[in-house]
Image: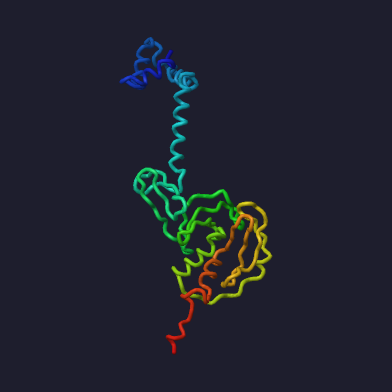
Amino acid sequence: AAAESLPIAAANAGGLLGWAWGWVQAQPSHSRWPARCPPLRRLSQLREAPALHPMRTAGSSAGKVLPGMREGAMNCPSCGAPMHLKPGEDSLQCEYCQSVYFPEKNDDGVRVLGVPSDQACPVCNIPLVESAIAKVRILYCTRCRGMLIPMDVFQSLIDELHVEEGGSMVQPAADSRDLRRGLDCPRCRHRMETHFYAGPGNAIIASCEPCLLNWLDHGELSRIVHAPDDRNPATTLDISSHE
């Protein structure tokens, strides 16, 4: 009877505390609070009462709402709601107040957007993270700082970085031992082809032709971008200015 009256009493103005006190007062005076405290022993038995199961289930399901607030890459700095990636952009947007957030660039010039992908780094075997460089979306490894770049945007990304960064640097010779590395494609898991990059930069990259993906280790994109190249006006010597 006590268990059945619990949900009703909890909804009344007196609440659970008033119900418990009234229940104690209704007991015979000789059995209210004996040395062994039967009411407490009985209340412990109520934990498994059928009437309490719906309340306990509801409470446990409600607790699952909180992790849902973190399904996005991060929560909005303004209102705390989840933020999600804007398709094809280098930013995140709040689904509630519509605020747009641009993560700071790291030392590689990459904006790490923080959303793990379903593809793993071929070097570290940890999930690659959605990121962007020069407004081009890529997948990035936060441990080894390698980059998985779609072939259809690879050249346009290099051209854009040429314009943004300019300048050239002395290129060290590539390590031919890197040609013997065995890397599996993060998408199809088949062995990638390791080869010298066809353009300037003394870089050795890995490619998966069926998936149209290029994998570059840390520093290789920078070597390509900053390589002396007649096609890049920023690295072309203006002879007329020295005549």
Is 28 rendered above or below residue 86? above
Foreground of the two, 190 or 182: 190
Extreme bottom residue here?
Answer: 243
Q: Is residue 197 visible?
A: yes
Residue 107 place in picture, x, y as percent: 47, 64
Q: Residue at x 63, y 71 (%)?
A: 175
Check the image and name the residue furthest to the left.
Answer: 13
Nearer to me, 147 or 141 = 147
The coloring applied to the image is: rainbow
Could you say where residue 145 lies in the image, as x and y percent from the top left? Answer: 54, 60
Q: Quadrant of the N terminus?
A: top left
* Residue under the point 66% across and 70% down: 176
**Left or right: where 146 falls relative to 194:** left
Q: Is residue 15 above or below residue 100?
A: above
Up-down relation of residue 97 to residue 22 (above or below): below
Q: Is residue 51 left or right of residue 77?
A: right
Residue 189 relative to residue 83: left or right:
right
Is residue 35 visible to the viewer in this orientation of the structure? no
Residue 126 x, y percent position in the rendering: 58, 52
- How far across and down, in percent of the image, does residue 209 sit? 63, 58
Q: Residue at x 56, y 58 (%)?
A: 150
Residue nearer the viewer, 171 or 162: 162
On-image quarter of the C terminus: bottom left
Q: How many marks?
A: 0
The answer to which quarter of the image holds residue 196 is: bottom right
Q: Is 139 in front, or is 57?
A: 139
Asked where in the image residue 223 lies, by quadrant, the reply is: bottom right
Q: From this viewpoint, which residue is outermost toward the right?
A: 180
